[in-house]
Image (cartoon, helix red, strand yellow):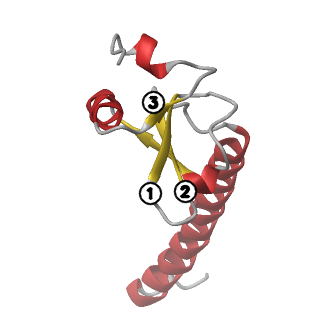
Amino acid sequence: MSEQPSRLDQLHFLRRYLLQELARVDGWIAREEEREAAQARRTPPPVPDWAIEMSLTGTPVTVHVGGCGLGGTQARTKPISRDEALRALSEGVEACGICRPDAALGWLE
């Protein structure tokens, strides 16, 4: 007859088994995180409703409707709210002559 493993041996076995299962779950998590990161890289950022183009010195230059192709580089254009766009126009920041944010906002000089 064979001896029954001791309770301590059984607990060590259970621990090894659970560590293997935990490693398997960690692998699933890593693959899912990579899949989500790849999906995020493929999904373009949302287009803001309004944007303001900044000069190299950081002063506002032009207000644009979000997605306007003349909005300059991404580094020099930042998304703004409707209220911020109206405020910028009222403070004398130029409206883009192509996308006409002043007309879209219902605000004309």
Tell me: 18 left or right of 71.
left
Residue 99 image point, x, y percent: 59, 20
Mark 3 or mark 2, which is nearer the start of the sequence?
3
Residue 47 image point, x, y percent: 55, 30
Give the labeled residue for mark 3: 50
Tell me, yes or no, whether the two marked residues, 2 and 3, touch with CB atoms within 8 Å. Answer: no
Q: What element carries label 3?
A: strand
Against 99, is 44 above or below?
A: below
Tell me: 49 left or right of 76.
left
Which amino acid is tagged 1? Thr
Which amino acid is tagged 3? Trp
Mark 3 or mark 1, which is nearer the start of the sequence?
3
As drawn, the label of residue 2 is none
Residue in the image at 41% along x and 39% along y: 93
Nearest the camera: 41 or 83? 83
Q: How crowded is mark 2: few (under 14 residues within 10 Å), some or many (20 or more)?
A: few
Residue 92 image point, x, y percent: 36, 37
The span from disc 2 to disc 1 (Cα, nearest Å) is 5 Å
Residue 22 image point, x, y percent: 54, 68
Give the labeled residue for mark 1: 59
Q: Quadrant of residue 67?
A: top right
Nearest the camera: 1 or 59? 59
Q: Quadrant of residue 16?
A: bottom right
Which amino acid is tagged 2? Ser
Against 16, is 71 above or below?
A: above
Against 44, is 49 above or below?
A: above
Q: Nearer the viewer, mark 2 or mark 3?
A: 2
As drawn, the label of residue 55 is 2
